[in-house]
Each structure stands twice: as C-alpha cells, then as structure tokens.
Image (cartoon, rainbow, N blue to C red):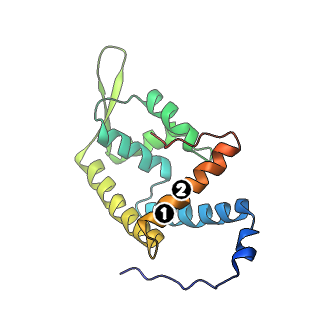
Amino acid sequence: MTTTQQLTPYPRRQLAAQPIGYWTGAAHREVVGRIRRELATESLTQPHWWILNHIAASPAHWTRAELTAKLTPYDDQGIDFTEVFDDLASRGWLTEEAADTATLTLTLTEAGEAGRLRAKERNLRAHEQTHAGITEEEYVATLDVLRRVIANLGGDSDLPE
C-alpha cells in the first residue's frame, strides 16, 4: 500500500509566487530518480527500458539506427545507444534478425520479455507512489498547466509518441 506524506500548508499567494522552474526541476529529479532506482535493480537504464518497450510493442520492426533516432531526443544523460543495444544482446535479451539483405531488425527473446516485465512491475509501483493522493482530475490539470507553460515558451507541448 502506498502512503502519502502530508504537505505543509502555505497561503495561496505564497504558493502562486513560487518559481515553476524550481518545482518542475525538483519533481523531475524525484520522479526520474525513483524510476532509475527501480530500473537499476535489473541493471537497466532508462534507455534500456525505452528500447525494451519499443521492441516489445513492434517486434522485428525497429533497426538499431531507427530506434536510436527515435529515442535520442528523450535522453538527458548522453547515453551511447550502441552500448545499450550491445548490453541487451549480450544478456540474451534481444536478437537481430535479417529483414532483408541490408536490414537487421530487433526482437526480444523470452529472457528479454521476462526482464522487461519485471522492470515494468517495479515501475508500476513507482507510478503508484507518484500518483498517491492525486486525483485523475488533478493530474490532468497539472499536465495541462505544464503543457501550457511549455507552449508559452515556444516548446513542443504535444504528447510524446
């Protein structure tokens, strides 16, 4: 069971004056830190997780180059995707099969799918803790506010693919 920590109450005016950059950064560090700790129990990074999920969703669809191009914009750590693919292959979690004479596509093995499901279960627990005490309406409103902030600053406020 997930418990929620009590928030210190502050006057509305004091909260309204808080810098959003600080709070979005603090939330990012906590949320991503929790996810990364959960993945680390399987010796995985977020790029490992992204790769596993994309391959599981579309077996024999992705090449290394295509998936690297798709995922690189989400990487904030300068990960070498070649090393991540090599690591998953050396674990026996993915295979590369010839789709044609020039293309090798990626597929998860049974061990890869089992590892992905273990990591998924850990991430679900982190997700539950993150959302504890927050209604769906509050969560959606928060995302819409953040999307508006991003759009106001000229960024891409569309949902990721």
User: Considering depth in this image, is 90 or 47 the residue closer to the camera?
Assistant: 47
**Residue pictured at 70% horizontal, 81% vertical:** 11
**Residue pictured at 75% horizontal, 64% vertical:** 19
Q: Secondary structure at mark 1?
A: helix
Provide the residue designation for mark 2.
143
Residue extending farthest to the front is 13
Q: Pointer 2 and pointer 1: residues touching (CB < 8 Å)?
A: yes
Give the crowd class for mark 1: few <14, some 14-19, many >=20 residues within 10 Å: few
Percent position of residue 110, x then y? 23, 48
Provide the residue designation for mark 1.
139
Q: Is residue 147 above or below residue 128?
A: above
Question: Which of the 4 image quarters holds residue 12?
Answer: bottom right
Please state if 58 lies on the left or on the right of 47 as rendered: left
Q: Is residue 48 above or below residue 4?
A: above
- What's the distance in space between the residues labelled 2 and 1, CA to CA? 6 Å
Percent position of residue 99, x then y? 29, 21
Percent position of residue 81, x then y? 51, 39
**Residue pictured at 66% horizontal, 51% vertical:** 149
Q: Amino acid at mark 1?
A: Tyr
Q: Secondary structure at mark 2?
A: helix
**Residue pictured at 38% horizontal, 69% vertical:** 125
The C terminus, quarter of image? top left
Res. 151 mark? none
Q: Amino acid at mark 2?
A: Leu
Percent position of residue 72, x then y? 55, 38
